Image (cartoon, rainbow, N blue to C red):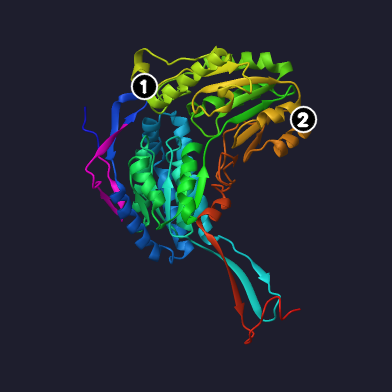
């Protein structure tokens, strides 16, 4: 076997080894015998060096005209587009999801980078009339400084781009810690940023564990914004770490997303949506459909159709174009999925299909679970309440539309939801009353686009949004500017009485 490539941290425009001298392996979850690369097991000292580089680079980067920053991002986006296939192949190898999905992940990074490049000529403020004579009022956006990013493994290029590109176009600098399961995709993204002209120190990459890299990144006073995507449990700790210094934080966390199927729904369409929502990315999406609630009059038919469709899914290596569902990201996540399946059985839910690890042949090399469906799930069960982050779907019946809304909202999370119905009144009522940040009509709970805000309510987030122009609120601050050309002191609210 070939010696695996050793990848380094990227600090101040140079690829450097960690001062610890320690490394870790990145393995293919579809074939854990395959080592994709060796990465730096960094320390707080490495983080300090990266933050110092970012803080120094900020002095000049913030002064570069935003349209010029945008021109560099246009080059980055074009390069991502040209190398889309190779980037997607690398992503499938390290993350496991099927090649069609990793191409979509890369496309999201392309879309977001093009979109934010355009913001170099927008970032609109506004002007207002003054209440005083010979006085001009306006607003402008200003960057904050060094941004610290902690990104997850399930969208290893899309989510880093959601954070990096708006931060950069606003004039901030970046230190990013990618997930230890998927560092290669972020290395590829940072490499392209560097080679397409982003100056040294503006983008920095430090790999390693959350405790040794993430925590010192969050706690450093020079880091003005922390953006985190991951579990609600870890997100709460990030918020607590940021709170004493009033540090800005953007938290995108867990979900327990619901698809409602009314009695007038196109059932075949609803099945297609639920299968894609539940088992796309092996259920490892914060927006994955993990709860399916179905009107009692079509419940049995819907369950039967779902089981038939799930049993037909081809599970395997994501590089095989015929594969429809890949592996879990690692053995730990597979064990979590299997433990929740046992919990569902003990709680009395009816196991309709799946429910076990796939073994034999090539399956023994990876972390594969069968697509799993439970029916007759009740609202008291843990598989109804807790995020599993794997290919497990819980189905429950309802009697009335009002009950469906109550069941949909019966969760600590509020990320994504959907309804399948031909009744426009019910569709609009559900749009209004289901307490989520993203809602779909006659579509699955996954499929967000980069030009609409992304994020959720309740324990899913802390009120901020990623993507679209909404994300500029995270990476810039408003400044109100008053220009008085009267030649006198004019006292607002006093002299104009």
| Span shown in magenta | 6-26
Q: Residue at x 63, y 31 (%)?
A: 443
> For numbered disc 2, what is the local secondary structure?
loop
**Residue placed furthest toward the bottom:** 487
| Image coords of residue 285 (percent x, y) | 51, 32
The answer to whether any part of residue 420 appears in the image is: no
Q: Residue at x 60, y 77 (%)?
A: 483
**Residue placed furthest toward the right:** 425
Mark number for residue 203? none
The residue singled out by tag 1 in the image is 366
Q: Residue at x 25, y 37 (%)?
A: 5
| Image coords of residue 486 (percent x, y) | 64, 85
Vertically, is 452 above or below 365? below
Residue 56 occupies quadrant: bottom left
Q: CA distance from mark 2 to mark 1?
A: 45 Å
Mark 2 in CB contact with mark 1 (< 8 angstroms): no
The residue singled out by tag 2 in the image is 423
Of the pair 428 and 81, the residue shown nearer to us: 428
């Amino acid at each position: 076997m070939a010696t695996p490539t050793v990848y380094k941290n990227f600090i101040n425009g140079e690829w450097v080894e960690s001062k610890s001298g320690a490394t870790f392996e990145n393995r293919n979850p579809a074939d854990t015998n395959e080592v994709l690369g060796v990465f730096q097991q960094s320390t707080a000292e490495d983080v300090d060096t990266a933050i110092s580089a970012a803080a120094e680079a900020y002095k000049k980067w913030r002064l570069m005209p935003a349209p010029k920053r945008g021109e560099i991002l246009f080059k980055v986006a074009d390069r991502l587009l040209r190398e889309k296939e190779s980037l997607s192949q690398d992503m499938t190898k390290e993350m496991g999801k099927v090649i069609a999905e990793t191409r979509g992940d890369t496309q999201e990074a392309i879309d977001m980078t093009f979109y934010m490049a355009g913001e170099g000529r927008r970032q609109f403020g506004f002007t207002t009339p003054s209440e005083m004579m010979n006085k001009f009022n306006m607003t402008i956006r200003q960057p904050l400084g060094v941004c610290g990013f902690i990104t997850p493994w399930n969208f290893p290029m899309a989510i880093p781009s959601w954070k990096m590109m708006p931060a950069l176009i606003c004039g901030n600098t970046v230190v990013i810690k990618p997930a230890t399961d998927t560092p290669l995709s972020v290395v590829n993204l940072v490499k392209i940023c560097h080679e397409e002209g982003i100056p040294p120190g503006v983008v920095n990459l430090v790999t390693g564990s959350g405790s040794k890299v993430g925590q010192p990144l969050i706690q450093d006073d020079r880091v003005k914004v922390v953006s985190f995507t991951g579990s609600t449990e870890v997100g709460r700790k990030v918020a607590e770490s940021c709170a004493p210094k009033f540090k800005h934080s953007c938290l995108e966390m867990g979900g327990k997303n619901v698809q409602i199927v009314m009695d007038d729904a196109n059932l075949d369409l609803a099945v297609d949506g639920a299968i894609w929502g539940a088992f796309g990315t092996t259920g490892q999406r914060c927006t994955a459909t993990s709860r399916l609630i179905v009107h009692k009059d079509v419940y049995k038919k819907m369950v039967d159709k779902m089981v038939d469709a799930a049993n037909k899914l081809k599970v395997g290596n994501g590089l095989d174009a015929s594969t429809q569902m890949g592996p879990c990201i690692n053995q730990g996540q597979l064990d979590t999925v299997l433990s929740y399946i046992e919990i569902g059985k003990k709680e009395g839910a009816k196991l309709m299909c799946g429910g076990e690890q796939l073994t034999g042949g090539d399956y023994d090399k990876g972390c594969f679970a069968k697509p799993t469906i439970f029916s007759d799930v009740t609202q008291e069960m843990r598989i109804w309440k807790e995020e599993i982050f794997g290919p497990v779907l819980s189905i429950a019946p309802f009697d009335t539309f009002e009950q469906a809304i109550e069941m949909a909202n019966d969760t600590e999370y509020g990320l994504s939801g959907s309804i399948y119905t031909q009744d426009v009144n019910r569709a609009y009522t559900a749009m209004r009353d289901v307490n989520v940040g993203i809602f779909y009509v006659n579509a699955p709970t996954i499929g967000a686009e980069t030009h609409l805000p992304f994020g959720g309510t309740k324990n899913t987030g802390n009120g901020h949004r990623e993507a679209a122009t909404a994300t500029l609120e995270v990476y810039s601050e408003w400044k109100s500017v008053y220009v008085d050309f009267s030649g006198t002191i004019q006292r607002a609210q006093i002299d104009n009485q």
